[in-house]
Amino acid sequence: MIYDHILIRYGEISTKGKNRKGFIDKLKSNIKRALQEFKSIRVEADRDRMYVLLNGEDHKAVASKLTGIFGIQNFSPAMKTERDIEAVKESALAYVSDLSGISTFKINTRRSDKNYPYNTDEVNHILGGHILQNIEGISVNVKNPDLTLRVEIRKEAVYLSGEIIPGAGGLPVGNSGKAVLMLSGGIDSPVAGYLSMKRGLDLECVHFHSPPFTSERSKQKVLDLCRKLAAVSGRITLHIVPFTDIQKLIQKQIPENYTMTSTRRLMLRVADRIRENQKALAIVTGESLGQVASQTLESMFAINEATNTPVLRPLITMDKIDIMKIATEIDTLEISNRPYEDCCTVFTPANPKTKPKREKVNFYESFVDFNELVEQAVNGVETVTIYPEQKIEEGDGLDLF
């Protein structure tokens, strides 16, 4: 069966007021980018709906791309047929026959063209009867059917739709501004990045690398995680920060139980400088309240002093098992579980302070001038842009780019 177009429903965008057009334009742009391999398609939009005109492209391949685009509530493959009732009957039969798991249905007809020779009830009965006669084991259920076949009769043609495929929801990526994601090689931060993009943020990632204490394979984990996130947004820019000198100085000058607090504060300072350079407006982290020593409320209070920039924490109230479920769904869990440590885990003290005091960490840091090392770290950043289709071989690292 040949589908003519795919009908897209907006979801949350529909609640927007005067700025709705901006959301629709961004969604349209994101859909065009995601479907650029399909050379024949066209995307059209109005205030309430968007249409992907297939022009012969495979609707299933296009649909598989649409399911991951934020801003889409759901969508339906649709077909165009001639106005002749016999043609409509055969098209309706083909539509229902093409779907699996359908045991009950109903027909819902709308006539935009009131001159059509059959009224809506007559069309419902004609099409329903034809389907019942030709598909064994199917029945009509007008209250709770498996499928509602929608028939729209217009002057130029008749359009059929029915199957409703869930979309990703959320807001179009890029519509809420830009932020930087502090991306480790762990489970949490990629999920935080994914959920941030679902709320419309355009992300750039910042990763702290401390050779020789962290290996090239730990960097490779981050490259592979970025490729997964790039599948959502179309591309991801990654900033890799040389962090060895700062961490060595922290280990030397700061009391052991406060090294984790100072490390996170210095990471925030560096991330904030990169954010400023990239004209972003927020920092995103994968912190979940109480999960580890640096994520207690007291720790966050002490660490946050390092910046006035908004720090967004999408996972703040989530349990680990819920975070892991999302990581499985977005295909990052296996990558994150590779046994290559990042700079945070390598330098974790035996007894980190779970309730650090701001005045104490400020006192300890007052004997050390980190400003020059922060500048060196920012100036030494390696920046790459990663695309979802790039093949990244383990161990290749940045040599690929």
Image (tube, rainbow, N blue to C red):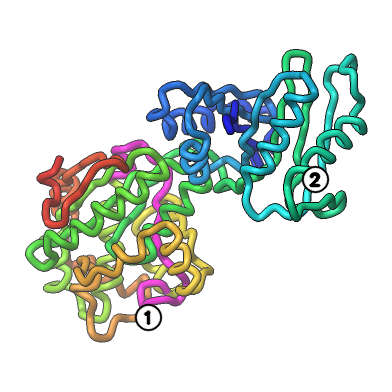
Residues shaded magenta = 274-295
Magenta stretch encompasses residue 280: yes
Quick one: which residue is furthest to the bottom in this view? 351
Q: Secondary structure at mark 1?
A: loop
**Among the 4 quarters of the image, the one containing residue 87:** top right
Closer to us: 374 or 218: 218
Compare marks 2 and 1 and give the one earlier in the sequence. 2
Closer to us: 341 or 91: 91
Q: Residue 299 — which label?
A: none
Tell me residue 45's x, y (percent): 61, 24
Q: Does residue 372 appear to the left or right of 52 in the view shown? A: left
Q: Are marks 2 and 1 in contact (CB under 8 Å)?
A: no
Tell me residue 351's x, y (percent): 27, 85
- Tell me the residue that label 2 is attached to: 132
Residue at the image point whose x is 29% and y is 61% from the top: 184
Q: Does residue 120 appear to the left or right of 377 in the view shown? A: right
Tell me residue 282's x, y (percent): 42, 47
Identified by mark 2, the residue type is Leu
Closer to us: 317 or 236: 236
Residue at the image point whose x is 30% and y is 50% from the top: 226
Q: Quadrant of the N terminus?
A: top right
Q: Does residue 173 appear to the left or right of 228 in the view shown? A: right
Identified by mark 1, the residue type is Thr
State whether residue 191 is above or below residue 129: below
